């Protein structure tokens, strides 16, 4: 895996989530199946997840990427069932099992803190921007609510053994590829407490002699195996814990306020000088830091400036680079190949996360971080 949370693949132009995906398909083993006829089979495969849901107090639930509505059909009476499904074909079939919104989650415009349970079961690997999706889930989930997230592990034992023949790579709509380790980081870095993780296999129909024997032939598509799938059971980090964390960060900032003010002032002055020269700015960052680089540069740029992400030649462009090195955030500004300003701020990584990703959480916790 890369140093990012996930490896991204491009979605082929020919990809579709309509009838060719939810109707009659050919699976990685060459079997022709009609997904519409597989309700009982699917319910058996998700028995562990359904048992967990049905042990919870009932409330309002949302199944994101609900497909044909099979999971919604398996929850106990008492749940107010909602689903979101991008496929018009699948959404029509799911209507019998709940209140279905056909489209993208962000377009459904659910109220804040609306759901007691959100299920994201084998959907996030199909999404081009998992972070935006997780932020929206955080917004609509009640503080005491649960998130159940299932996805393949693209760094599992079978994935490493079979390489390009790993069966879950053969779905061309899998575009955001997580590992076990990176999904743990992804959830924890964005405000979720992981209560438990399961790797469904031994209790499923896939645990059989044929699958085990197939592990010896790496020239063929890998069989279903333990660790291919992982299910995370998560809750939003409790507000008292967030307040404690925010207070610690606030204390750190108070003790280092002068250094931070100098850091911000010098960066703003350097950016101003570059903008006054009429140079377009290009922002660079290491791995997942690039979006953070853009956000931080926007914060530091003078009011009314026209700093934008732009590609150009070194002779025509000023470059803003952000890197982490041993707990230090380093900002380097370059123009015409020469360094204009290089500054460093020693601070824990949590500050960057709170500044750029947790602003809403910090505000709720009553702490101003990089105000």
Image: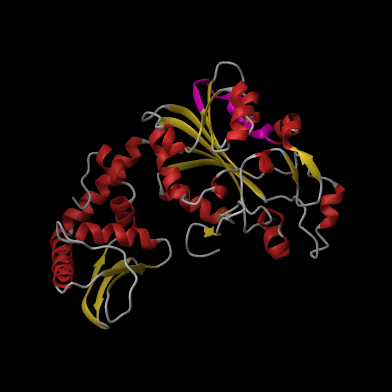
Depth check: give the residue in front, 334 or 350.
334
In which image quadrant can residue 203 be found?
top right
The N terminus, quarter of image: bottom right
What residue lies at 67% left-to-right and 51% top-to-bottom? 227
Counting from the top left corner in percent of width and height, residue 74 is at 65, 25
Task: Residue 216: name its quadrant.
Answer: bottom right
Does residue 145 belong to the magenta stretch? Answer: no
- As for residue 53 lying within the magenta part, the answer is yes
The answer to which image quadrant residue 73 occupies is top right
The residue lying toward the viewer, choosing from 306 and 47, is 306
Q: Is residue 236 visible?
A: no
Taking the image as drawn, is residue 170 in sight? Answer: yes
The residues colored magenta run 46-61
Relative to 199, residue 319 above or below: below
Residue 116 appears left or right of 218:
left
Residue with the most extreme front position: 14
Q: Position of residue 311 (x, y in %)?
A: 34, 70
* 104 with respect to 212 (left or right): left
Residue 364 in the image: state x and y as whole percent: 27, 37
Which residue is at a point 65% across and 45% down the rendered structure image?
199
315 left or right of 78 in image: left
Question: How far across and how far down the image is residue 132, in percent?
Answer: 42, 46
Horizontal relation, residue 250 to residue 283: left or right:
left
Tell me if residue 301 comes above or below residue 236 in the rendering: below
């Amino acid at each position: 895996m890369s140093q990012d949370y996930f490896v991204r693949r491009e979605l082929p132009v020919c990809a579709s989530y309509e009838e060719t995906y939810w109707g009659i398909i050919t699976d990685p083993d060459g079997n022709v199946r009609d997904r519409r006829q597989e309700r009982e089979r699917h319910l058996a495969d998700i028995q562990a997840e359904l048992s967990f849901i049905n042990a919870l107090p009932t409330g309002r639930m949302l199944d994101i990427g609900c497909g044909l509505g099979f999971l919604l059909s398996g929850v106990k009476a008492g749940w107010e069932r909602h689903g979101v499904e991008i496929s018009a074909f699948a959404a029509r079939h799911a209507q019998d099992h709940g209140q279905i919104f056909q489209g993208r989650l962000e377009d459904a415009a659910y109220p804040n803190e609306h759901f007691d349970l959100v299920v994201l079961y084998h959907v996030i690997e199909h999404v081009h921007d998992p972070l935006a999706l997780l932020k929206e889930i955080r917004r609509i989930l009640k503080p005491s609510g649960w998130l159940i997230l299932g996805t393949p592990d693209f760094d599992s034992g079978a994935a490493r053994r079979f390489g390009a023949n790993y069966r879950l790579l053969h779905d061309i709509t899998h575009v955001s590829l997580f590992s076990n380790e990176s999904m743990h980081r992804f959830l924890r870095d964005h405000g979720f407490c992981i209560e438990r993780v399961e790797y469904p296999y031994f209790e499923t129909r896939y645990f059989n002699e044929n699958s085990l024997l197939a592990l010896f032939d790496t020239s063929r598509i890998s069989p279903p195996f333990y660790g291919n799938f992982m299910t995370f059971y998560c809750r939003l980090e409790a507000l008292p814990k967030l307040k404690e964390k925010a207070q610690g960060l606030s204390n750190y900032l108070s003790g280092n306020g002068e250094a931070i003010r100098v850091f911000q002032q010098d960066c703003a002055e350097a950016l101003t000088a570059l903008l006054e020269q009429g140079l377009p700015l290009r922002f660079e960052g290491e791995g997942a830091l690039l979006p953070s680089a853009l956000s931080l540069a926007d914060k530091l740029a003078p009011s009314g400036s026209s700093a934008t992400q732009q590609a150009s030649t070194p002779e025509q462009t000023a470059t803003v680079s952000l890197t982490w090195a041993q707990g230090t955030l380093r900002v380097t500004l370059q123009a015409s190949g020469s360094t204009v300003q290089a500054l460093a701020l020693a601070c824990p990584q949590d500050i960057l996360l709170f500044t750029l990703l947790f602003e809403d959480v910090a505000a709720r916790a009553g702490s101003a971080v990089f105000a």
